Amino acid sequence: MGWTEADVERAHERLLELTAGLPGVVAEEAYGHVAYLLGRRRIAWLFIDHGGDGRLALCVKAPPGELEALVAADPARYFRPAYAAGWVGVELHTVTPDWAEVGALLEQAWRMLAGRRERTAYDAEHP
């Protein structure tokens, strides 16, 4: 595995910082991982050795084509998560995370699930 509990905590804290600005998103421990939810719907997971894969990774909801584009551009950083069609895996330990890109992916996932009013209010506050 190579990562420690301190690494997991640092990744979780950073993800909390990034999701704090997304209205309605909360974090919840579930099944040994951390889910980031908008209402009852997940926008992302912090996977900790998911299915014994040894990874510390973010799995984030993505629109069609996003996974393929990211993996083609940087296969060391992005991957196809097991059992999660329509999601992008982001390695958080073996490569240094691009936190700005992670934040953009989280916002994109939030936009996919947020209502029109939520998006309009968010855009008014974040021109």
Image: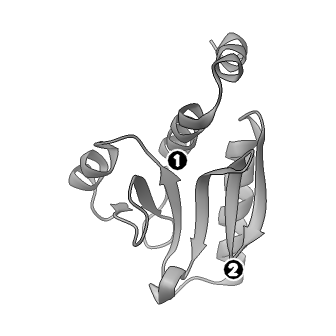
Foreground pick, 66 / 102: 66
Q: Residue at x 70, y 82 (%)?
A: 5
Q: Which colour scheme is used?
A: one colour
State which tag comes first along the sequence, 1 or 2.
2
- Residue sitting at x 71%, y 35%: 22
**How many numbered marks does the figure carry?**
2
Whole-percent x, y for residue 81 in the image = 40, 67
Name the side, left or right, on which 126 lies relative to 109.
right
Question: What residue is drawn where x is 51% and y is 53%?
Answer: 60
The answer to whether 100 is drawn above or below residue 50 in the figure is above
Identify the residue under disc 2. 32
Depicted 93 relative to depicted 21: above or below: below
Q: Is residue 39 above or below residue 120?
A: below
Q: Nearer the viewer, residue 45 or 1?
A: 45
99 to the left or right of 10: left
Point out the frontmost of discs 1 and 2: 2
Q: What element carries label 1?
A: helix
Q: In which quarter of the image is residue 21?
A: top right
Q: Which of the 4 image quarters holds residue 126?
A: top right
Q: Which residue is drawn at 57% across and 31% down?
A: 111
Measure the C-alpha gap from mark 1 to mark 2. Answer: 21 Å
> 109 and 17: which one is in front?
109
Image-quadrant location for residue 36:
bottom right
| Residue under label 1 | 102
Task: Kindly identify the amino acid type of the residue bearing the numbered disc 1.
Answer: Val
Image position, residue 10 (x, y; %):
70, 66
Q: Is mark 2 on a helix, strand or loop?
A: loop
Neighbour tally class for label 2: few under 14, some 14-19, many 20 plus, Cα within 10 Å: few
Outermost residue, left direction?
Answer: 72
The percent coordinates of residue 127 (x first, y second) are: 62, 12
Q: Which amino acid does label 2 sit on?
A: Gly
